[in-house]
Image: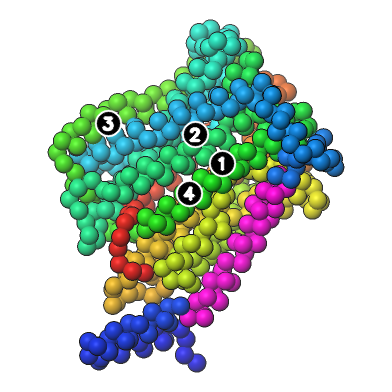
Amino acid sequence: METFEDNINEVEDQEAEHPEDEKIKSRNERANLKKSPLKIILSILFLLPALSALIFSQIIPTFRTIGMSFQEVRAFGEGVFVGWENYQSLAENHMAGQATVFTLLLTLNRVLLVLLPPLFLAFGATALKSGLRKALRIIATLPWLLYSPFALGVVWLLLTNPVFGFGGSVFNLMNPDLARWIVLGIDGLSFIGLACGVGLTVYLSALKGEGYGEDARNKPAKSMLFVAVLLVVGTLAYSLQTGGMITFMTNGGPAGMTATFNSLIMSEAFGLMRMGMAAAVATQLLVIVMVLGLVMVILMILSNFRIMAVPAKTDLVTVSKGLRIAGVILMVFALLGLLASFLPYLLKFIPLFRMPGDGPFAELAQIAEDGLFWKALLNTWWIPVVIVFLVQFPITYLAALAIGALRPLGKNSEWLLLIFAPWLFATILILIPGMTRLVMDLSLLNRLTGLSLAYLVNIPLLVMLTFFFKGQSQKYDKDENKPGFFKTYVWPSLPLAGFGIVVSVMVIQQDLVWPRAITMDPGLTMMPAFLWRLAVQRGAGVIAGVMLALRVPAFILGLIIFGASQLFIFPRLGIKSGKTGKV
């Protein structure tokens, strides 16, 4: 029985023997074969797991959350329909107003940080030789390894402690007139490193992508503008939902001056046990975030966005001399901001050893005697690894292959991403009212299956891999000697997929919101939840030794993995947008 690939090869072999007028006919036959029923059937089979996961982890919790926002729900009991009362209460709630103002300030601050410094670094990097550029990539990677909201909260609580902290008497978080601006500065200092690391990486890929292929240009990449839009929209969406570090530091105080939507949802849901009010806050965020996700994916499709594997020695596109000089000058200021983001991690050692008691290692030894500590440490590794490797990644990867590689709708296949796009930027925070209710209805509290429910599909990774497969498809579209399916799509995607797996594991490891909400079982408690309870019971200073002991090995391991990614994976990826040959 002839297979789909046999038919394709037969048509291609016949082209060599056909005159020019018959070649047109054979190309049309090949185009029809590309839309064969076999591809459509395989695409449906590959998409089914992701669609099922989307229903349980995103769609049902979304509608549950929206429905609960029109109910009065105390704790996790049955709700009573109250119409728009929750929204009216929020409009009159002083704390909600404070949270809106502060979250918008926080978001604006982050958007500026992700827009400008990484751009300066990228244009400055075009003037550097390959070795210096690699060193810059490594430096920009370090904040990725240090950025952990809970760990950052502990660091800043130590540094701002008025008794044994470094500058705690000046940076008084209990002063209502200063707290908001101090926290904005702290967040900006913590975020600038992450912004530079991520921004520099994608900007360099855009410069490399534009400099590769038959339509290369000796000018700054037009893809840079689209990357800037992507960074701004992503930062805007995630910043509206962020605030875990600030919630741990100040709990929204003093007088609500540092309240965020994050702290408001957590306070209403798990402090006051008013799930209806929490759902009303979450629903408003959901609408904004879902619109941003749809807009982002539509822009990516209309701009013909794609990610491609490029030769290792492909250099960056050449930019004008004036732009390189300006980039180098501005890069110095961006580097100063990047290096400044490391200061809190260095200065934390000062209060660490000035704390009252026998020192951080004595506290660590005492905590290590608790069997729950070792159980939580073990859970922090095996639970995320099992979830990602056995559930999340296979579901995500198959869906990306279906849309980006098999391309059942031809050049219009990316529009299938609109099914997933509304939840591109959605975090568990804004789905937690509906997700918690779903887990309770399914009797999955304190179970691994209930914990896994929020992580079934990784939509950002799905979008990234889909556009990578699209780039590979366009790269070989006019190649008569196109490699087979495995060499065209699967093999080149493995480094990028591996990086996605590592990031997915780290995200689950650092998630404090969902594990706290879904389980009190010590058998499923991971380290962030364990340390949170310890800090609440005994104070943040008690867990300093634990953080020191855990973060150092994690930093070394992360440096090896992410450093290798910056040297061997990202330099081989190009980002492009704009017209190209047909798919």
Q: CA distance from mark 1 to mark 3?
A: 34 Å
Residue nearest the observer in this picture, 181 or 368: 181
Q: Which element carries disc 4, helix, strand or loop? A: helix
The residue to which callout 2 is attached is 147
Q: How many marks?
A: 4
Within 10 Å of disc 3 (Cα), the crowding (few <14, some 14-19, many 20+) is: many
Q: Is residue 25 left or right of residue 431?
A: left
| Residue that protrudes farthest toward the left in the picture | 321
From the viewer's perspective, is the residue at label 4 or at label 2 nearer? 4
Q: What residue type is disc 1 on?
A: Ile
Residue 375 magenta: no
Q: Residue 272 in the image: x percent, y percent?
A: 77, 28
The residue to which callout 3 is attached is 331
Q: CA distance from mark 1 to mark 2?
A: 26 Å
The residue to which callout 4 is attached is 295
Pointers 2 and 3 in contact (CB under 8 A)?
A: no
Q: Residue 389 in the image: x percent, y percent?
A: 58, 57
From the viewer's perspective, is the residue at label 1 or at label 2 nearer? 1
Residue 525 appears in view: no
Q: Which element carries disc 2, helix, strand or loop? A: loop
Question: What's the magenta bit mostly, secondary-structure-wise?
Answer: helix
Q: What are the residue bounds of the magenta stretch?
A: 36-65
Q: Residue visible at 51% across and 80% down? A: 38
Disc ID at residue 288 = 1
